[in-house]
């Protein structure tokens, strides 16, 4: 079995970081997660996972600019690293290869 | 969007400050800026679709969700605070294990004290929890009536049959009202009961008449049946779960029939099954017989002359019980006043009271009622005080031992201060040590209490369950252990931390006199408390023996009562004859009026002949129906005249009265006089006063006649050494008369003794706890004497070398302690006398507190103290002097 080293929640967060691009900081990511999945999540939970992904080397971060609604505090912007992108790709390809081994199942549900 | 603007413009829309502070305290510095920023942004968003409170709550939720390992500030284990705490604990532990004996005594005494006070606390909690089961308990009251006679206030709880329904009609604030009636006069109390399809009777107690509405009012939980209809027919009853399981195992008893006292033509239907009354309920019944359409005699339901019904009421929400009690006087005005000979006077002195349901158990000392398991609020306080004192004695041990051993810690304190320790650090060290002791003692004490709880339940006649699973228990124990540890440690830690380093290290540190004085007064306190407890115990025991061996005025020994003979009908007379044929039976009598509490009683008024029409009530007294052998069986003494004689036909108009009755009627020469109660009776004899009721009260008036006695009991006087053989022969005779009913007997002396179970119980509880208090105090004394011997080791050795005898060493070491104990006795004696004198005032028949009580208690205290010290003192005298001297 291929070791992807990404849990479901981790994978979604990585993708969201990619989607949000320059706006990828904990609060925005948590909001976006809720919008996309409809699941309630606390900022703390998101932040702790982002922190873990950073230690694994999938993300880097730097302090961004401050805004008024944050009481003049800066935010931490996360960016995907090359390793992160590769992990996403591996994960994707692994799943596609699994789907290919289930032709009947795939056909029945008429996935493109 | 308009409302949102409004919310935003509100001044109070900052995130909760406390939550932010929490974050600042707990979150790693490098993360704080971004996290607080993120949460603030989230808060602003939340404000747009939540209320301010909602948003704040959400902020808290987010804050708490940040308390994760990655974000929390890593605390170094080597910061000074935690480091010092570790050090404190380590030093404390070492101190404890270095001096095993002292530590064991400190912890042992503490644990005993904690176990004792925990048990007493549980007892008190149980007593206070009585009748708290109904949800609306605070709106439920028992009604009682008060009559202020010139010399005494009378309060009682029995009311007329129509009282309840009339009150409900007249006063809208009454939500529910219900009566019961458990009087043996009306055929309840006890009975022979069986299922209709079974031949054999079982004897049952705990039977009472009960209103349908009272079940609803008390919220008795029904297992089968409906609380609104289970008692709405005449021959219907509700039984408890345990009786249902006895008679109808595994089935639903509702609708089934039972036979009551062999009355086969009126079987009683089971209307429902209730849960057993919990042990902490004043009402304890198993069979509730319906009062619907039932009159005890014809016309009872509208008769205002007889009071037989305790009555409970539930008021509507918001009704004031005091106002309601005042309004109840209307009843007296309309229905009762006109019967009185002096209505105005009577009305002025009559009033009603409402007793809250939860007060019935503990606060009924001055109210007569048919409840037998009353507690006593005074006893609860007394008991609580004992618990507090035992705990105090244990704390004193701790304080004494800690300060006594101060010399051995003085150098440590001096050195700590020299190398820069603040006093607060040293105080903290000793407080931590005290906490270690306290927590360990609590753990052991709680376990101890848990282990002995079953025995304690036996002793106290309770069924307390250890409250492991109660929510309050663990936090309370933790808080108490910290509090007690702090309390016990505060004086030693301030004392020990006050040493001046220069003096201590120079070696000139001497035991200060002030401290020795404190220690002595604490020992005096311990022993004063112990001696008070010893004296109280001796007095309680004396009173108990005094009662049990009281000159009652009749002979209660070897009187056997055969019960339940009413089911025999007329056959009871041949039964009596056959019993008399037994060699071991001296005499026998038929009748229900026995001279023990709980037997059949009534209340009547007697007037002298010729004064019938006078307006006074006459003399009150019991009116008993007995047979001519009664005085013989009970061994009563005639003061004047004679008892009844079967051969004299005129004795059917005769009456025998007791001295109290003669006195109340004002008769100097009662013989030949006539007294009136519905008709005239000739007085033919006066019997010596005998106690037939609670020995705490004065002997009341009594009149006995021989007109058709009730046949529920046959009492026989035995004269035998072979009790088992006699019982077998009695049983054989009984089988002939009543094959379907087991023989049921009681001995008058045993019944009498069980009536005073509460006194006995109190005696036992007091003995146990005063023993405990003394043990704890002795533990402390033992350790103190050991310490003293240790301190004076060199002095003793030198004395021995110079030729002192063991005896003189013994005297030297014990004199001081004996002096303290003597002071304690002097202090304790008047205190104990005062307390016990108060207690004894509750009895009419009471023992006296003589000097011998104090002598016994005093010598016991001295002996116990001497015994405790002498081990150490003798050991000190026998030691080889060289061992004490060779080190220098």
Image (tube, rainbow, N blue to C red):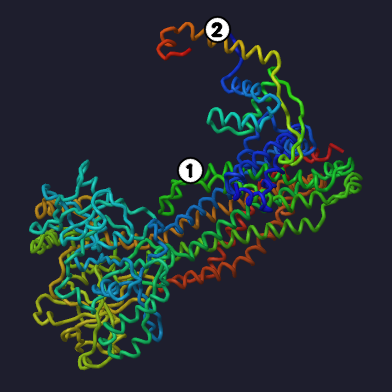
SS of the residue under disc 1:
loop
Callout 2: 10 Å neighbours few (<14), some, many (20+)? few
Residue B549 in which image quadrant: bottom left
Q: Above or below — where is B611 with respect to B462?
A: below
- Pointer 2 indicates a residue of which chain? A
Q: Above or below — where is B815 with respect to B883?
A: below
Between B443 and B686, the one lying in front of the other is B443
Callout 1: 10 Å neighbours few (<14), some, many (20+)? few
Check residue B469 in the rendering and tell me which mark sits there, or answer none. 1
Check residue A1 in the rendering and tell me which mark sits there, or answer none. 2
Residue B411: x and y in percent read 84, 43
Between B659 and B819, the one lying in front of the other is B659
For marks 2 and 1, give the CA distance: 50 Å
SS of the residue under disc 2:
loop
Q: Is B454 on the left-hand or right-hand side of B84?
A: left
- Pointer 1 indicates a residue of which chain? B
Residue A102: x and y in percent read 45, 8
């Amino acid at each position: 079995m291929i070791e992807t080293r990404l849990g479901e929640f981790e994978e979604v967060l990585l993708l969201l970081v990619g989607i949000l691009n320059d706006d990828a900081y904990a609060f925005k990511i948590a909001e976006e997660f809720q919008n996309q999945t409809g699941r309630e999540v606390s900022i703390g939970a998101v932040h702790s996972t982002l922190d873990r992904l950073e230690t694994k080397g999938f993300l880097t971060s730097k302090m961004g600019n401050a805004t008024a609604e944050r009481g003049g505090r800066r935010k931490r912007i996360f960016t995907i690293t090359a390793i992160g992108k590769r992990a996403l790709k591996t994960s994707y390809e692994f799943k596609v290869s699994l789907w290919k081994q289930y032709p009947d199942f795939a056909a029945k549900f008429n996935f493109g | 969007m308009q409302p949102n603007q409004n919310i935003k413009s509100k001044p109070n829309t900052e995130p909760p400050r406390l939550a932010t502070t929490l974050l600042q305290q707990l979150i790693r510095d490098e993360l704080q800026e971004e996290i607080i920023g993120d949460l603030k942004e989230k808060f602003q968003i939340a404000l747009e679709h939540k209320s301010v409170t909602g948003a704040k709550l959400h902020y808290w939720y987010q804050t708490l969700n940040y308390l994760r390992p990655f974000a929390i500030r890593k605390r170094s284990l080597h910061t000074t605070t935690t480091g010092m705490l570790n050090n404190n604990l380590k030093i404390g532990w070492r101190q404890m294990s270095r001096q095993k004996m002292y530590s064991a005594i400190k912890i042992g005494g503490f644990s005993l004290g904690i176990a004792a006070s925990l048990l007493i606390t549980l007892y008190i909690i149980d007593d206070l929890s009585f009748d708290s089961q109904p949800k609306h308990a605070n709106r439920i009251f028992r009604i009682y009536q008060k009559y202020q006679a010139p010399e005494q206030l009378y309060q009682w709880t029995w009311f007329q049959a129509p009282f309840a329904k009339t009150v409900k009609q007249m006063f809208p604030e009454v939500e529910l009202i219900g009566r019961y009636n458990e009087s043996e006069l009306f055929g309840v109390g006890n009975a022979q009961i069986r299922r209709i399809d079974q031949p054999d009777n079982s004897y049952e107690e705990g039977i009472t008449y009960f209103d349908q509405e009272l079940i609803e009012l008390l919220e008795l939980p029904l297992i089968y049946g409906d609380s609104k209809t289970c008692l709405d027919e005449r021959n219907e009853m509700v039984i408890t779960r345990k009786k249902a399981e006895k008679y109808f195992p595994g089935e639903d008893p509702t609708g089934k029939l039972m036979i009551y006292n062999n009355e086969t033509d009126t079987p009683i239907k089971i209307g429902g099954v209730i849960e057993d009354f919990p042990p902490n309920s004043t009402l304890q019944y198993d069979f509730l017989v319906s009062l619907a359409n039932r009159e005890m005699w014809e016309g009872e339901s509208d008769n205002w002359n007889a009071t037989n019904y305790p009555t409970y009421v539930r008021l509507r929400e918001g009704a004031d019980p005091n106002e309601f009690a005042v309004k109840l006087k209307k009843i007296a005005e309309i229905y009762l006043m006109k019967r009185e000979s002096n209505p105005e006077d009577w009305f002025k002195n009559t009033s009603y009271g409402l007793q809250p349901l939860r007060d019935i158990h503990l606060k009924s000392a001055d109210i007569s009622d048919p409840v037998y398991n009353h507690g006593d609020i005074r006893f609860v306080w007394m008991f609580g005080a004992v618990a507090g004192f035992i705990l105090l004695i244990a704390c004193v041990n701790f304080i004494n031992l800690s300060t006594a051993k101060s010399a051995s810690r003085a150098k440590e304190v001096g050195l700590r201060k020299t190398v820069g320790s603040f006093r607060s650090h040293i105080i903290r060290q000793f407080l931590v040590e005290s906490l270690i002791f306290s927590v360990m003692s609590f753990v052991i004490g709680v376990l101890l209490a848990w282990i002995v709880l079953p025995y304690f339940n036996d002793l106290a006649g309770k069924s307390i369950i250890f409250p492991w699973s109660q929510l309050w228990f663990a936090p309370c124990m933790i808080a108490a252990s910290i509090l007690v540890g702090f309390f016990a440690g505060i004086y030693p830690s301030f004392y020990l931390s006050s040493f001046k380093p220069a003096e201590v290290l120079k070696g000139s540190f001497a035991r200060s006199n002030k401290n020795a004085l404190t220690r002595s007064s604490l020992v005096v306190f311990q022993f004063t408390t112990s001696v008070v407890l010893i004296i109280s115990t001796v007095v309680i025991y004396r009173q108990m023996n005094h009662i049990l061996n009281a000159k009652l005025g009749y002979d209660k020994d070897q009187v056997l009562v055969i019960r339940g003979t009413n089911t025999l009908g007329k056959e009871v007379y041949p039964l009596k004859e056959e019993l008399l044929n037994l060699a071991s039976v001296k005499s026998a009598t038929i009748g229900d009026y026995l001279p023990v509490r709980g037997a059949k009683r009534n209340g009547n008024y007697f007037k002298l002949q010729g004064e019938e029409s006078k307006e006074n009530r006459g003399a009150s007294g019991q009116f008993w129906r007995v047979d001519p052998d009664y005085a013989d069986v009970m061994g009563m003494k005639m003061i004047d005249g004679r008892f009844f004689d079967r051969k004299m036909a005129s004795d059917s108009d005769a009456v025998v009265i007791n001295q109290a009755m003669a006195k109340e009627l004002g008769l100097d020469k009662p013989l030949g006089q006539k007294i009136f109660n519905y008709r005239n009776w000739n007085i033919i004899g006066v019997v010596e006063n005998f106690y037939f009721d609670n020995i705490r009260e004065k002997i009341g008036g009594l009149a006995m006649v021989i007109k058709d006695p009730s046949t529920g009991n046959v009492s026989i006087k035995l004269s035998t050494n072979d009790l088992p053989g006699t019982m077998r022969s009695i049983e054989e005779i009984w089988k002939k008369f009543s094959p379907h009913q087991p023989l049921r007997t009681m001995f008058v002396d045993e019944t009498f003794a069980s009536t005073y179970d509460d006194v006995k119980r109190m005696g036992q509880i007091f003995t146990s706890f005063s023993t405990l208090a003394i043990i704890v105090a002795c533990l402390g004394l033992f350790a103190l004497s050991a310490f003293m011997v240790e301190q004076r080791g060199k002095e003793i050795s030198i004395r021995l070398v110079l030729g002192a005898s063991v005896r003189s060493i013994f005297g030297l070491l014990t004199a001081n302690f004996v002096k303290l104990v003597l002071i304690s006795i002097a202090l304790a004696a008047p205190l104990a006398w005062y307390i016990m004198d108060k207690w004894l005032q509750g009895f009419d028949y009471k023992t006296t507190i003589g000097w011998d009580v104090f002598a016994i208690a005093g010598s016991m205290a001295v002996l116990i103290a001497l015994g405790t010290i002498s081990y150490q003192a003798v050991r000190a005298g026998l030691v080889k002097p060289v061992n004490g001297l060779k080190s220098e």
